[in-house]
Image (cartoon, grey):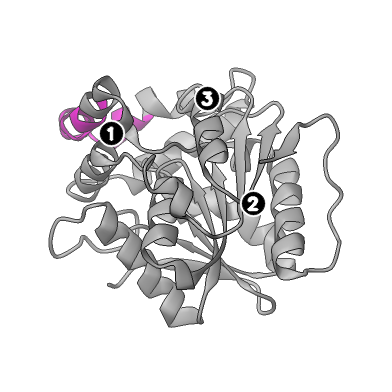
Amino acid sequence: MNVHLEKAGSKGPLLLCLHGIGSSSAAFAPQLAELSAYVRVIAWDAPGYAKSPDPAHPLDLDGFADAAAEVIRAHGTSAHVLGVSWGGVIALRLAARHPELVDSLIVADSSAGSGTDPAKAEGMRRRAAELAELGPREFAERRGPRLLSPDAPPELVRRVVDTMAASVRLPGYAYAAEAMAAADLRAELPAVSAPSLVLCGDQDRVTGVGASQVLAGALHKTAYVIVKDAGHLANQEQPERFDAWVLSHLRITDRLPETAHLPEQEFTSCL
């Protein structure tokens, strides 16, 4: 499946970045800039998002996971996979469905899927109609600010809103929303064998700390980190802290040189 990719870095293992349901590869600008000194970073525009063409047929969660698997196969034999929010749900299904392709997981501000709660699933399914009614710009203006902490700088809020407005469209967003609404990964999480880092902003108002704790508790080989002073988009709001934890995880799982200093006053536990 043809998708648009942003790439940076020419050495080291492959890190594939999967964005949230209202975003694109632009969400990983800080990681493309920083982590590419240590690994080869690829960030996708999911099928039907931003610069990627619309898929030829509707995609469910397996379809998005298989599309990510195609990206990995086209660039090597396996990859570390970083997924934010909806991207984290795709990453977890990818690891369960294609374990040979996933060296490790970094799952940020994510959940086991909206299918774990009927009210959340219903709300997710309503989003496509909301996008159709409002259009991408007003849709983004309403939803974007909540993805960050209340104290996020205005320029970051504007960048997040602009990225969403430029990224979401139908039918791709509708396929993604339905995939998320139908997803309940709780039963398959214990079977995921890849070592995992689960991160969550301490001020995440979307999925929240509790949803990340569910993931961390169910996965076998897990480190769990709270990122201070960050909302749902911790990788964009606190990129230095976020990237330091990712590099630490990669150093452990892929024997990268110890180059990152871990931020102080953040909680991490191995489960």
Instruction: Identify the disc placed on residue 45.
Output: none
Sort mark 2 into few (<14), some (14-19) or many (20+) by Cα contacts within 10 Å: some
Quadrant of the drawing holding the C terminus: top right
| Image-quadrant location for residue 227 | top right
Above or below, 3 relative to 86: below
Q: Of the residues tagged 1 and 2, which is closer to the observer? A: 1
Which x, y percent locates residue 214? 50, 32
Q: What residue type is labelled 1?
A: Gly
- Judge from the rendering whether residue 246 lies leftward or rightward of residue 99; answer left or right: right
Q: Is mark 3 on a helix, strand or loop?
A: helix
Upstream in the sequence, badge 1 or badge 3? Answer: 1
- Residue under the point 69% across and 79% down: 11
Quadrant of the drawing holding the N terminus: bottom left
Q: Does the magenta stretch include residue 129?
A: yes
Q: Is mark 1 on a helix, strand or loop?
A: helix
Sort mark 1 into few (<14), some (14-19) or many (20+) by Cα contacts within 10 Å: many
Our reading of the magenta stretch's main secondary structure is helix
Gap in angstroms between the C-alphas marked 1 and 3? 16 Å
Upstream in the sequence, badge 2 or badge 3? Answer: 2
Q: What residue type is labelled 2?
A: Pro
Which x, y percent locates residue 261? 87, 49
Q: Of the residues tagged 2 and 3, which is closer to the observer? A: 3
Q: Does the magenta stretch include residue 195?
A: no
Q: What stretch is highlighted in magenta?
A: 123-140
